[in-house]
Amino acid sequence: MTTKNLLVELFVEELPPKALKKLGESFAGTLAASLQAQGLAAADAVATPYASPRRLAVHLTGVASRAADRAVQQKLMPVAVALDAEGRPTPALLKKLAALGADASAVPELKRQTDGKAEALFLDKLMPGATLAEGLQKALDEAIAKLPIPKVMSYQLESGEGPDFRPGWTTVHFVRPAHGLVALHGADVVPVAALGLQSGRETHGHRFEAAADPVVLQDADAYAGQLEREGAVIAAFEARRAEIARQLAAAAAQAGSELQPVRDEALLDEVTALVERPNVLVGRFEEAFLEVPQECLILTMKANQKYFPLLDRAGKLTNKFLIVSNIRPEDPSAVIGGNERVVRPRLADAKFFFDQDRKKTLESRVPGLAKVVYHGKLGTQGERMERVRAIAAALVAEVGKELGCERLPVEVDTAARLAKTDLLTDMVGEFPELQGIMGGYYARHDGLGEKVAQAIEDHYKPRFAGDELPRHLGGAIVALADKLETLVGLFGIGQLPSGDKDPFALRRHALGVIRILTEQRLSLELEPTLRAAAQVFGERITDPTPALSDFIYERLAGSLREQGYSAQEVDAVLALRPQRLREVGERLAAVRAFAALPEAAALAAANKRVGNILKKAEGAVEPRVDAALLKEPAEAALAEALARVKPRADAAFEGGEYTESLRALAALREPVDAFFDGVMVNAEDAALRANRLGLLATLHAAMNRVADLARLAA
């Protein structure tokens, strides 16, 4: 059967830019998958998605005009219902066969098979393959229905076909009004319909710069080339994105040898979804605006104007920016001038907010926090601030035991008291993304010192996966206190994440706590820290420590697996729920080194066996051994080996040498194997049995200080 390439395009009004990439991928993927499922396209058919501001399209290779016929076996009914006592077909069977286009002559060919409950009759028949028109109609309907549309529009059709069509009254629901449908199988139009449109071969290019309108497509393979030549449109999202990135780099180099545009993948995606024929130009603004914090200027240019600010080699903002225009005039000065006029008021607003905010100190804004509701059950931002201060003070008292930093308590308390005050500033009111950042600038302006300013700025960190951590200990403590207050408070009132819903970003906060404790090497113990934070809330909440501790260990386990540790390694370490999370990395390294030893597998299996024996023992088993009751040579040898190895392993453990601690245990393999070969643990004599269980309990305790080695057993 011959095949041809297929092209399907929906031509619409401007699609929502932040959703365009997903819409294009979904449309192409669903349509291709449906045709493959119907046997009209091979499993290795290549689907190429196209998505521009005014079109969704897909090019699919190797599509047949008709699917191959296929043999199917259809269950009819139980034999007891289909045949009478003499084996003749019943009226029910004949009626069923007639509905399937067969008659009584087919009865001898029916197969008897058990369907799991009773013997039934089955009919083998050949189903004709779907035509491309039928299959594509089904695939197109499915692709449109499954589009991840952020918000559906309703509009009325002005033209259409069919007896039920009424101009201006027939309503369509779609992401944007659709104006054209193309369906080409090679050079042939496939007759399908969607959204009140009939398929054809005409599409449209750029609104202003197309060389031809409409663009009459020659065949499926000519789509991208014709649109670029005649329609002045780069139809493929990725190709357009790559072209914009290329032009951004070239324009930056032309504007200054050491200049580079701000890296922002989300902005690049959004701009790609806004233009069909990108043209990057260089704009400028007055250098006086550079007195405003560059984060403010960068954010307003990116968020409001979709510009790419230019930075120098040191990462400092310059007064130049890149414009991604959708037109290519011979003289671009008007386009550049227009954009420069548009950005100026935005920058002026930012300067005004910055100047106004600095007229009030952060300290003077503290009373205003009492007027801002944080949560209906947890009070105001003022109350929250006091809780963060209390938690931070407890953390300082604990951490300060080993560090002895004299200024730390004052710096941490000042930062914790003022950290949320920038929420009341005009700049953060306009740009919420700048909270914390602006607090740092205003703290410097108020003369609070660099340590306090950095702690205020850093207390939201890490904001996302891979984000940097607070720059110094004070900032780390304030950030930790802020995240603990959020987690403990919301868990304490039952506001837990559910499925993919996490409105308070508690998963992100938990990962932030984990990273601060592990990467900044804080010696805090997790559950005592959670309980101390819960006490700060008084009667407002129920102590959430058990559930919250589980939640944090689950996040930690997932994070470690993403870092490349095996599930066995992670389970072995976290089964002991180590309270100092900073030790987890060293324990994992020790487990990995132990697992590589030739004795590891046997010891892990023995450890698992010991654990099972101790679980089945009646009552609690004390790890205690009476040498006088060691009757068998193998148990005496194990006790002697334990007495020799355990002190060395314990000393290494106490010194944080976890790898050495586990390596010392390797010497126990032979005496452990000999013990299980030659000693009956559950002896008739109660005293002997208790002593042997005590010996195993001593062994179990010695082997499982770094990790639960039984988790390494196959």
Image (cartoon, grey):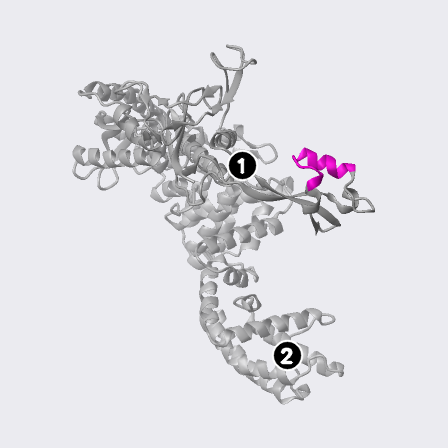
| Picture residue at 31% right of the left edge, 25% below the top | 351
Which residue in the structure is indicated by mark 2? 695
**Residue 31 in sight from this viewpoint:** yes
Q: Which mark is residue 267?
A: none
Residue 410 sits above or below residue 156 on the image: below
- For mark 2, does the 10 Å Cα neighbourhood hold few (<14), some (14 to 19), or many (20 or more) residues? many
Which residue in the structure is indicated by mark 1? 503
Residue 301 picture location, percent across and down:
31, 28
**Residue 311 in sight from this viewpoint:** no
- Magenta segment boundaries in residue numbering: 91-105
Answer with left or right where residue 482 lies relative to residue 344.
right
Look at the image and say whether residue 103 sits in the magenta stretch: yes
- Toward the viewer: 417 or 555? 555
Amino acid type of disc 1?
A: Pro
In whole angstroms, how far apart are the C-alphas of marks 1 and 2?
52 Å
Look at the image and say whether residue 113 sits in the magenta stretch: no
